[in-house]
Image: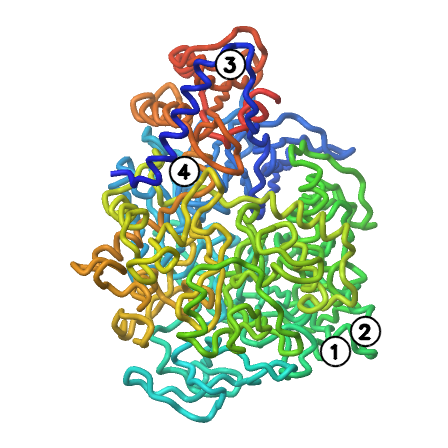
Amino acid sequence: MTPPRLRGIQKSLLAAAALLAVMSPGFTPALAAPPSFIAFESGQVRPLALSPDRTRLFAVNTPDNSLSIFTVGANGLTLQSRVQVGLEPIAVAARNDNEVWVVNHLSDSVSVVSLTGTPRVVRTLLVGDEPRDIVFAGTGGRAFITTAHRGQHRTHSSIAAVPGAGDPKLTTPGVGRADVWVFDPANLGASLGGTPVRILNFFGDTPRALTVSPDKQTVYAAVFKSGNQTTSILEETVCEGFNPYLPCLVNGSIYPGGSPGPATNHEGIRAPEVALIVKYNNQTNRWQDELGRNWNNAVRFRLPDQDVFAVDANSLGQKAAYSQVGTTLFNMVTNPVTGTVYVSNTEAFNHVRFEGPGNYGGTTVQGHLAETRITAILGGSVLPRHLNKHLDYTKLATDPAFDRTAKNHSLATPVDMAVSSDGRTLYVAAYSSSKVGVFDTQALEADSFNPRLNSAAYIPVSGGGPSGLILDEARNRLYVLTRFDNAVKVIDLATRAELGKQVLPNPEPASVVQGRPILYDAATFSANGEASCASCHIFGDMDDLAWDLGNPDDDVTQNPIPGRLLGAAELLKPHINGSGNVEDFHPMKGPMTTQTLRGMVVSGPMHWRGDRSTGFFGTSGTDPNLSFMNFIVAFEGLLGRSTAPTQTEMQRFTDFQLQVQLPPNPVRNLDNSLTAAQQRGLDFYAGSRRSDGIPFGEGLGFTCEGCHRLSPAQGFYGTDGMASFENIPQIVKIPHLRNMYQKVGMFGNPTTPFFLAPDSGWQGDQVRGFGFVHDGAVDTMARFLSAIVFIPSIGVGFPLNNPDATRRDVEQLLLAFDTDLAPIVGQQVTLTSTNASAVGPRIDLLLQRARTPFASKILGTGVTECDLIAKVALGGRVKGFLFSPSGNGFIPDDGTTASVSDAALRNHAKTAGQEVTYTCVPPGSGPRIGLNR
């Protein structure tokens, strides 16, 4: 049953559609056109590949959803052709001289591209959510593809018999969430999206990079955001009163003391009671804070921190696991002579508290957020090597003794790598430095290199954002893909000079291109050349960590955000916000998980408390543009820059970032329907029973939806930008709910007074150290929903009858929560001469969703769930088609006919070499992707 509020939205949309249908032809309604480009900011992994015969170079064009194919000659690169693939391609690998495979991050697919005849997609393989990398290995040349442990296809009936397929168990403790899909290219099967040999699962969170041993018999898989054995402990387990050495008893457990302090900011205003980040000490087997106190009683799980896994490419059995490799693992490469595995990574220092100068609080992470590293895995040894060990982090940019030349020798955000055939030289693309680092592998492994001397060999690259490297030793060249200008550069290795470039077509608006570098550029926007906004906001997203970035040297400011239930705050919490004033933002906010920078354009004020609503550029409780502009202070206070960016630079950054969107929800059904449990959850969520407050009185209680608003037409997906008092020590902004599925993996909490859920008991090994709510200390949404503010009562709270069942239903809804884009966006399939019976129903589904009205603030009005395009090789070229719902046919890109029927288009695939690939693209992007090629 659809709740009344949502029924009203649906009726309004249908009424509007009916009204438009009967309008006179001469009347043109003022409808907001959907954007022709949606930015996702997917991080490239393996964007370049060379054919085995070294005559062709392949480059993914992420924003253009295409693969560029170049011939390699004495004079450089010459464009041979471009092939449209899936949405957001980020990795490519050549299977042989005539076939390449492209990983499509947003489409959850792999495009098999044939170079025989007209280059084209001949098969689309469907895999798990957000695939990232691909390699070929083993005696039969199997394909290995990394994906998240979720996604609609892993539960599809066509692969039910595949080992590893099925329910991802998002609410089950102790489940590995790193998947690698394995295909036999010689036997893909005729099923909907190909039949994998197996879906391998490893005990880590979502994986990213792959590499292969020199003999091709071992595959290595790396967890992307693998963590660093830190976690947040619940605020109530940190004893009240800021006495670190006075233990307390909470629900039967003894905890060692209060917050390490200081108890006030520099103004002497009392700080709020907050959670605490602790780090596991492998020598003492204790969870410890900065004072060395033992917090084992507050943690109910263990983090084995397994970062890289070795698997036998033939038997597909796990051979080894390697820990302590790094916090965020970007790419891997193997030394072709020694077999040493090199992992580009950063190591986060989130266990160190506070931003700012560190005067009053005594500590700061300013300029020292995450160290740039390459870790060598040599035999059983894991050898982390800090590439910027010349930096003196004890001196801030405001210190007269600070070395302003040090940044010239720094590298930031190390991504793709390449190793020379003799195994002696390693090249690493420094995405945030516009350089390629060059290292002697023996010196790197021995940690005997000197960055100040070594930097003379670094290769500067124009354009910015080097993300992919390919060595062409026969021609003494290095090919570099630079993401900021979307181009491929040809570098002479002897002179380090740029010999030429091939600019890839870029449909991104100028505002996206101009603003992107400010997110990443550590050379320009930090004092030491290592720190950037992307140090924590990885590719504009989360790092899956919490940080205590309070600033005791800062002042208390005023909160302009309108809120719910605020009248009860000072009555029930005399020390609300520390100061006792409901309208205060205290600068010592405590641990907060890194929030995504995606999907913020209609979410109002920013930060967990919304505290960027006031700042350098002014105050507004509603304006997201102003709120993001107010992040300007982080460049000095956090990144350690000696001066702030200009207003023009900050506006460019804002204009870029507010255009970046979240992906569709990978848990929700592709037809946008809900499961029975999700529907029951929605019935309660959007029903009439108040879940919070009291059961009577205007503004004294709210339903779930009355607080966490769900109104796609207004852009509300859990938040309308307002704040709320929820009987915790600080007033926080009501958060959006679009990415809850990304936070699964920490299970285990002690019992505390605020939650009705019992002590979880010992949960053993888990894959994440941070979970839900602002500080990441709550292990599951089910526990959050057991908070005392939702206590089952007469007329309010969860139902008196079996409340846990309703909590579980709401949890299922939250995992599949609505987003700005329908779940069908990005989905694709290829119809061949042999798979019509398997693929036909999926084509029917794509057509159905392309006809179905959809509400989304960012897309404007009058859109459907997707624009459906099709590509087929005809007459020596790949021809494009765009489905017209009103005409019930496909418009060709050459205008030769008004439209082509569905049946006629499918009929093309009956001829060998005329495979038809259908893709649901974002509404508004269809003409650009389908026709304007």
From what the image shows, is residue 265 above or below residue 308? below
* Sequence-first tag of 2 and 4: 2
Label 3 crowd bin: few (<14), some (14–19), many (20+), radius 10 Å:
many
Q: Is residue 248 left or right of residue 438?
A: left
From what the image shows, is residue 50 above or below residue 393? above
Disc nearest the viewer among 1 and 4: 4
Q: Is residue 770 left or right of residue 6?
A: right
Tell me the SS state at disc 1. Answer: loop
Q: Which residue is mark 3?
A: 891
Q: Which residue is mark 1?
A: 395
Q: Residue furthest bottom?
A: 246
Tell me the SS state at disc 4. Answer: loop
Q: Amino acid at mark 3?
A: Ile
Marks 1 and 4, how far apart in space? 49 Å
The picture quadrant where one finds residue 627 is bottom right
Q: Which residue is mark 4?
A: 823
Marks 3 and 1, how far apart in space? 63 Å
Q: Quadrant of the N terminus?
A: top left
Q: Amino acid at mark 2?
A: Asp
Label 4 crowd bin: few (<14), some (14–19), many (20+), radius 10 Å:
many
Instruction: Please report contact status of discs 2 and 1: CB closer than 8 Å, yes or no.
Output: yes
Q: Amino acid at mark 1?
A: Lys
Q: Which residue is mark 2?
A: 403
From what the image shows, is residue 718 above or below residue 760? above
* Sequence-first tag of 3 and 1: 1
Marks 2 and 4, how far apart in space? 50 Å
Marks 3 and 2, how far apart in space? 62 Å
* Sequence-first tag of 1 and 4: 1
